[in-house]
Image (cartoon, rainbow, N blue to C red):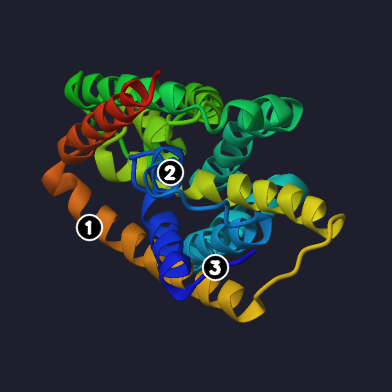
Amino acid sequence: MDLDFFRASFLAVLQGLTEFLPISSSAHIILPKELLGWADQGLIYDVALHVGSLLAVVVYFRRDIMVLLSAWLASCFRGRHSEDSRLAWYVVLATIPAGLTGFLLKDYVEQYSRSMLLIAFTSIFFAGLLFVADRSGRQNATLGEMNLRSALLVGLFQVMALLPGTSRSGVTMTAGLFCGLDRRSAARFSFLLAIPIIAAGGLLEGVELAQSEYAAQWGMVLYGLVLSALVSWLCIHYFLRLIERIGFMPFIVYRVLMGLVLLAVYFLRMP
């Protein structure tokens, strides 16, 4: 890993923003490499940035996590069921499809993760799907009104996030809207789902890292982790405050433009 201060900062901010906004992190990560010719930053820095995002979402939802965990344990060992325990079970169940599929198809996903053409098409397609979800029906249900069918649908949609350019947060919010959740509730459930998914992904990458030899710039790694966590926290905070007011249209337009840029770069480079 050989990172200067600018590249380390740029990638950390990019991770913090794109992990939770519905704009596809893979589409943004590929652009600096393709347009600026940057070398790969290395697995250890990727792990650090994802750990930063994980810390941010855990800290931001720390009270919710404690309540949900306590309710979940009470439902498991004491048979006490409540609205909070149901939501906790929904998070667990919605995580299983993507977690299992990602584990089984990890090598296949990595093989196509840098396909600019695929990322461009999926970015545009899922922007259109988000547009349809945001404009169809009435989204007025809260997380307390969520049911098992809705949780499983969101979980199945999350499997599609394994396709580069899809955006995990974008596709889970899309599913939440299709299930009738209001925008804020769809976003909150998406962020809660991010915790086990990011943790599992970071654990797998960490195991690979432990089995390899890396010469790391530990000061830069720590800096990237902290900056990623800070930007991620701010992103979650302001997104939840603004989403009901601004809606998803700015992100939909941005994704379409991003996809068109990637398509233009791809075809311009064709021989």
123 with respect to 72 (left or right): left
Q: Are marks 2 and 3 in contact (CB under 8 Å)?
A: no
148 with respect to 270 (left or right): right
Residue bearing mark 2: 25
Q: Which residue is depicted at the point 49% across and 22% down?
A: 153
Q: CA distance from mark 1 to mark 3?
A: 34 Å
What is the crowding at mark 3: few (fewer than 14 residues within 10 Å), some, or many (at least 20)?
A: some
Is residue 32 visible to us here?
yes
Q: Observer-nearest residue: 100 or 179?
A: 100
Residue bearing mark 1: 241
Q: Which residue is depicted at the point 37% across and 44% down?
A: 35
In the rendered image, residue 223, in percent from the top left (x then y), is placed at 52, 77
Q: Observer-nearest residue: 37 or 66?
A: 37
Disc number lying in front (1 or 3): 3
Residue bearing mark 3: 3
Helix, strand or loop at mark 1: helix
In the rendered image, residue 266, in percent from the top left (x then y), is placed at 37, 25
Q: CA distance from mark 2 to mark 1?
A: 21 Å
Q: The disc labelled 2 sits on which kind of residue?
A: Ser
Q: The disc labelled 3 sits on which kind of residue?
A: Leu
Figure quadrant of residue 140: top left
Q: Which of the marked residues, 2 or 1, is nearer the chain's N terminus?
A: 2
Helix, strand or loop at mark 2: helix
Quarter of the image containing the C terminus? top left
Q: CA distance from mark 2 to mark 3?
A: 20 Å
Q: Observer-nearest residue: 140 or 265?
A: 265
Q: Which residue is depicted at the point 72% across and 29% down?
A: 107
In the rendered image, residue 154, in percent from the top left (x then y), is placed at 47, 28
206 with respect to 42 (left or right): right
In the image, residue 221 above or below residue 151: below
In the rendered image, residue 60, in percent from the top left (x then y), is placed at 44, 66
